[in-house]
Image (tube, rainbow, N blue to C red):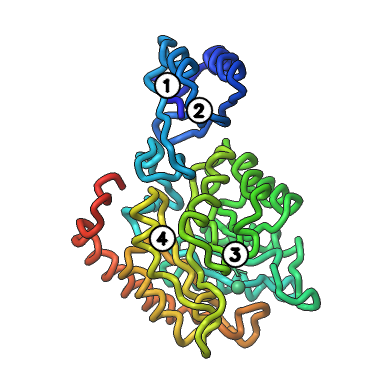
Amino acid sequence: MILPKAPALTEAQFAEVLEILSEFDCSATPIAGETRTIYAIRGDERHELMINRIEGLPYIDRVDTMQSPYKLMDIQSELAKNKIRINNRILGQDLLIVAGHCTIDPRNPELFIETAHAIKEAGAHVLRGGVWKPRTSPHSYQGDAKALETLLRAREATGLPVNAEVMDEDQLQMAVESGADMLQIGTRNALNYSLLRKIGELTADKNTLVLLKRSMHMGPISEFICAAEYIVAGGNANVLMCPRGTAPGPEGFRNNPDESITPLIKQRTWAPVVVDPSHSVGKADYVPHAALAAIAYGADGLCIECHTNPPKGIGDDPKQAIRPEVLRRLIKDAEVIYEMKKEFQGYLPTAAHH
Ligand code: PEP
Ligand code: MN
């Protein structure tokens, strides 16, 4: 990782750096942070001569060569100084609530607009709505690009930033062009490395946040963090880590709740953790319990399925969407626990870096 003295390298300086790197079969990707751009080295960055030559350039502060499979995501990385913001919320300081339909019904767009207003009233900060849906059965409703218009209309009507999942590069392209504020990589694509890198590249010069769900097939935590590393290596460091339950779940739950990995993630990386209790427990009655537990574990936010009339919803909404009045109370309770937790941050030995 190359750290310039100024907030960013000029074009000519970057070209000179690339020239040196190429002699050692390396390259670099700029990653724009809040206060300065860093340059992630691609290739083996341990060549001593290469490091010496780059550090010898008058406009370079230093070269960090961290031996970690996730050197950009690592809590010791320069990127730990970044602040991720959306809707005037600063992740890590302000609790972030993402809420909305699992799936936008293109035949009933007004229902989504109604929910959008209701979740804003309830105190949520980002509106979620599924446009394209990853469904286990190919015979289930798969989503519809038309729903993207509804999502954007709801943003216009409420002023809330919006989040949608993308599953392939065409959808990604469309969502980026639409100016969606947050993009979601779902549990099924959590290990789709080319898509992860691509989303980082296509959103590199934008303020788009990427909500990365954890693979439901529970690999080690390092696998989850390395997946996020691909997004950052592509050029976007606005990554949020989202545990959402792993398969199989105990009888009665859709998945095995995994909000308890929150402190593990936070000890190893700087990335905020936004837990999804809806897909974890999979039943509206249990969602508030799992949500509050996530905050007690130290989560920075929640992503919750919410619908003004769940029986009329499609996708997961009839089963697991909570109603806006439940969301309102849940946000209030979550805020109380969130504030209490701030006093206990000293529990994590590395929390000072955060
Ligand atoms: C969703 O958010 O509706 C969704 C399909 O999520 P996941 O990828 O966690 O299943
Ligand atoms: Mn869903």
Q: Residues within 10 Å of mark 4 (few under 14, many from 20)?
A: many
Q: Is residue 230 left or right of residue 339?
A: right
Q: Which of marks 2 and 1 is nearer the N terminus?
A: 1
Ligand 1's quadrant is: bottom right
Q: Residues within 10 Å of mark 3 (few under 14, many from 20)?
A: many
Name the amino acid type tagged 3: Thr
Dot 3 or dot 2: first in sequence order is 2
Sequence-first disc among 1 and 3: 1
Disc number placed over residue 96 in the picture, else none: 4
The local secondary structure at tag 2 comes to: loop
Residue depth check, mark 4 versus mark 3: number of the one nearer the observer: 3
Residue denoted by label 2: 45
Residue at position x 45%, y 51% from top?
A: 86
Estimate the x, y position of residue 320 in percent, counting from the top left: 55, 82
Identify which residue, 94 or 267, lies in the foreground: 267
**Residue 83: image x %, image y %?**
38, 44
| Mark 2 vs mark 1: in front | 2
Mark 1: few, some, or many residues within 10 Å (few <14, many ≥20)? many
The residue labelled by disc 3 is 187
Q: How crowded is mark 2: few (under 14 residues within 10 Å), some or many (20 or more)?
A: many
Q: What residue type is labelled 2?
A: Glu
Residue drawn at 59 percent across, 39 percent down: 234
